[in-house]
Each structure stands twice: as C-alpha cells, then as structure tokens.
Amino acid sequence: MDLRKDRRVQYTKKVLREQLFSLLQEKELSEITISELCKTADVNRNTFYRHYNIPLDILLEIEEDVFEKLSAVLRKSTNMDDVILLSCQLLESDKQMSKIVFTKADGSGILSRILRSVRNNFPVENQIELTAEVKPFAEMAYQFGEKGSIAVIKNWIENDFAIPAENIAQMISYLVNKLNKL
C-alpha cells in the first residue's frame, strides 16, 4: 500500500512540476494561480495542498533537488576542474530544469551554496600561502571567481546551452585557476 501511495505522490509531483514548467514558459511565477496550475495538471486543489502551499514551493523543491545532485557531484570529485566539468554536464543534461531554476527562480543561490561547499572541500589555503597582506586579496579574488562563474553559467543557460558543457567548464576552470595563481 505504501509503495502504491508513494507512486501516486511521485506522479502527482511530476505532473505539477511539468505543468508549472509549461506555464512558466508563458508567464511569471507570480502570475500563476493554484487553480490554473491544478486545472492544467488535472490535479485536485486538495491534492495540491497536500504537498505544497503555493507554486513557489514546487520551485524550491526543484532547487533543492538540483542542489542535492550538484552536491553528489562534489562528493565524487577529487579536484576543482572535475567539479566544474561534472556540474556543467549535470546542468546541460536537464536543460528544461536548468532554464527554469536559473532564469525563473534565480538559481544563483544554489550555485552559491555549491561554491561554498567547493571552497570547504578545496580551500584556497591549500593552494597558496596566505599571508596577512594576501588574505584580503584572496578573499576578494574568490568572491570575484564565484560571482563570475555564476554569471557565466547563467548566461550559458539563458543562451540555450549554445556552447558545449565541456567548453564552458574549461573556460571557468581556466579563469578560476588563473585567479588561484594570483
């Protein structure tokens, strides 16, 4: 019984997610009503409320899924270049989800969370000696690299992944590695 119920929950969430994606192609999240979403998904409002309070909750759940997938990539990687490559490939593998998260929901928060994890796993202190004079500069360089990487990824997604993931990863790796050598 639990397995059958779980499948129904998965199906309901899948349908709501897909219909939200579809509606987001036409309008902003703030313009999408629960009634409209339920009608297009052929889901009862009570069923919707069993899982979510508002359509934004669906996007937040998707963002958390993306974060978990990117975190799994991080755990499997042994160096920064692998993290960047695998992350770009993951984003490219589900273009629709990436577009929704990074253009409609501003997924820079996800990327910032991942980059903080990366920073904890690959501390700059292990790459260069941080003297008192260099430490503030290293922090600013890291922030520049983080925000720049996020901007490159968002631009890549907004431009329909026109460049292969491997090339984007190579570009980001090159820039990050140059920053680390300053």
Image: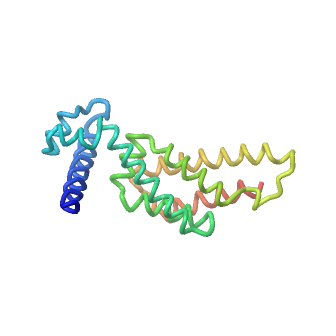
Structure colour scheme: rainbow
- Residue at image point 59% right, 57% down: 172
Which quarter of the figure has residue 60? top left
Q: Nearer the viewer, residue 179 or 106?
A: 106
Judge left or right: residue 66 versus residue 74: left
Which quarter of the figure has residue 81? bottom right
Q: Please count the marks in the image.
A: 0
Residue 3 drawn at (x, y percent): 22, 63
- Residue projecting furthest to the right: 132
Query: The C terminus lies in which quarter of the figure?
Result: bottom right
Residue 45 drawn at (x, y percent): 17, 37
Judge left or right: residue 132 versus residue 18: right
Q: Nearer the viewer, residue 175 or 77?
A: 77
Query: The N terminus lies in which quarter of the figure?
Result: bottom left
- Residue at image point 36% right, 56% down: 95
- Residue at image point 47% right, 47% down: 154
Residue 181 drawn at (x, y percent): 76, 58
Residue 178 drawn at (x, y percent): 70, 57
- Residue at image point 17% right, 45% down: 41
